[in-house]
Amino acid sequence: MSPDTESSTTRTWLRRLPFLVILAVALLGAIALRDEFSFATLARHHDQLLAFRDAHYVWAVLAFLAAYLGIVALSLPGGTVATLAGGFLFGLFPGVLFNVLGAGTGAVLVFLAARTGFGADLARKLETAGGKAARLQAALRKNEWSVLFLMRLVPLVPFFIANLIPAFVGTSLFRFAISTFLGIIPGALVFTSVGSGLGEVFSRGDVPDLHIIFTPPVLLPLLGLAALAALPMVLRAIKGER
């Protein structure tokens, strides 16, 4: 192997290393931390968390943002619990702001790691390969804004997957970041609101009802936003048929 080839191979693996680390940590976290980032853990330590927040508010905010960003960036379990904790500790506002900032920034880091490691190369290969894969990629790019917002608004696509698909089809960082930060706001509002009422839940010894997102008062507005996001794609398809 020539020095140039060896150097190129080293650079390639260095580019891929952050994403490979994320995958490894995510796998270990799913096995080892599945029961650590849970509602039961939050309930067990809620008094200590409130005491720390009251004594060191700024440090509590910074620690929360760092923890939430780490959970999302490393694809660890506990994103929903972190959102509830944001509402519990900081109320609906500024809790929802902290939740969106932590989740959105973590998602951008995952996107960058995936795109730098494998996504850019895969996107180029899809373009040059032709066939159905290239046509699918072209269709996704043609309806990029609609698809990106739909993945965030419809509560069916796992958050981690919604970070990877755009990286693998060549989505720009600007479009990914805008659609992520704006698209997660409705869901963040719902779960932050639930979290802001956890004090009463803890006092009763109950668990929060996270199925609230599937109730008509919450789900119908979300579906309405999803339909609005999909409208340009639908109109473009109708125009194409005509």
Image: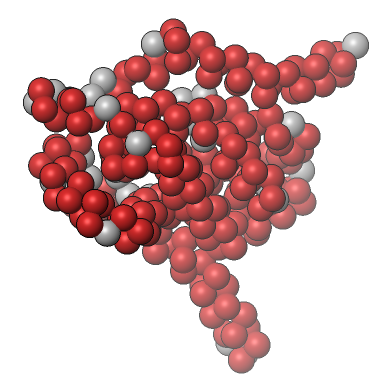
Which percent across, then down, holds residue 38? 20, 40
Q: Which residue occupies 52% across, 39% down?
A: 162
Q: Which quadrant holds the N terminus?
A: bottom right
Estimate the x, y position of residue 35 in percent, counting from the top left. 16, 43
**Residue lying farthest front?**
55
Q: Give above or below for 155 relative to 50.
A: above
Q: Name the residue furthest bottom.
A: 3
Q: Quadrant of the C terminus?
A: top right
Snapshot colouring: secondary structure
Image quadrant in which you'd find residue 52: bottom left
Horizontal side of 119 relative to 76 (left or right) equals right
Q: Give x and y (percent) for residue 194.
A: 32, 26
Please determine whether, in this image, residue 116 is positioned above or below residue 223: below
Which quarter of the figure has residue 62? Answer: bottom left
Name the residue at 63% across, 83% down: 5
Q: Does the rendering let one see residue 149?
A: yes
Counting from the top left corner in percent of width and height, residue 48 is at 14, 50
**Horizontal arrangement in the rendering, residue 142 relative to residue 185 (left or right):** right
